[in-house]
Amino acid sequence: SRSTRPPYIFIAITSLAATGRALSLFSQPAPPRTAGDDGRSGTMVFEDMVLVDGRTHMLGRLASTAAKELLSGQKLVIVRCEQVVVSGSLVRNKVKFTQFLKKRTNTNPKKGPVHYRSPARMVWRTIRGMLPHKTARGQLALGRLQCFEGVPPPYDKMKKLVVPAALKVTCLKPGRRCTVLSRLASEFGWGHADLIERMEAKRIAKSGEFYAEKKAAAAKKAKATAAAADPKVDKKLAEFGY
């Protein structure tokens, strides 16, 4: 029998933009399947695009889940790649990346391998390594992936999801050392960490203002609804099914 898709891959997360901390988690089940005549799973229905917030995700766990979804036909956009986490101390990861930089073509280094310095390209390259990217199927899967530092428009006003199986809090034991990609990339020549940090601060402040206005409007509406409530009218409306 064919392997079935995990029932809860992505979790929707509603964040308080002013602090960046999660307020609540809502499970989002996987898209439904239609069974064929032979009893096996048939066509899968996907979302147009899944927006994943890479903050505090483990790089390898996130990449493996993303690769599986891309091969299944799902389009993915990963934002805030600079806050993706790699296990191990900064010194250890610097040594590993330095060894990676030594891998080159002796006759002509321009032919590769290419050593990307930006966090978004690091995440992209990690996912590419888990795809058969030299085949037509792998190239199509890789074309469904986009990675960004920060949260550029129009994704700043869209609902973001997380991958519970890839979160640092579920993968790493408390007290274990880890390295944030932005720090590692900055050590090897990526020079936009300060710019991304300033842009994120502005975005979070703006989102906080929007959330405050939204809460005030909801409270005002609830107060008006309570003031306009009439038991007689409610009883009459209930008779008509409202």
Image: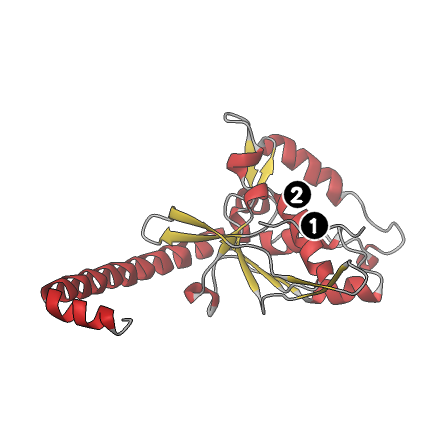
Q: Which residue is mark 1?
A: 126
On the rendered structure, is 191 left or right of 75? left
Q: Nearer the viewer, residue 173 or 23?
A: 23
Q: Secondary structure at mark 2?
A: helix
Q: CA distance from mark 2 to mark 1?
A: 8 Å
**Residue 65 seen in render:** yes
Compared with 36, 118 (above or below) is: above
- Marks 2/1 in contact by CB < 8 Å: the verdict is yes
> In the rendered structure, which amino acid carries the disc numbered 1?
Thr
Identify the residue at the far bottom of this view. 240
On the rendered structure, is 177 left or right of 236? right
On the rendered structure, is 35 left or right of 1? left
State which tag comes first along the sequence, 2 or 1: 2
- Residue 38 location, quadrant: bottom right
- Residue 103 location, quadrant: top right
Q: How is the image coloured?
A: secondary structure
Q: Which residue is mark 2?
A: 60
Name the residue at 79% across, 61% down. 138
Of the two numbered discs 2 and 1 in the rendering, the one whose residue sits closer to the viewer: 2
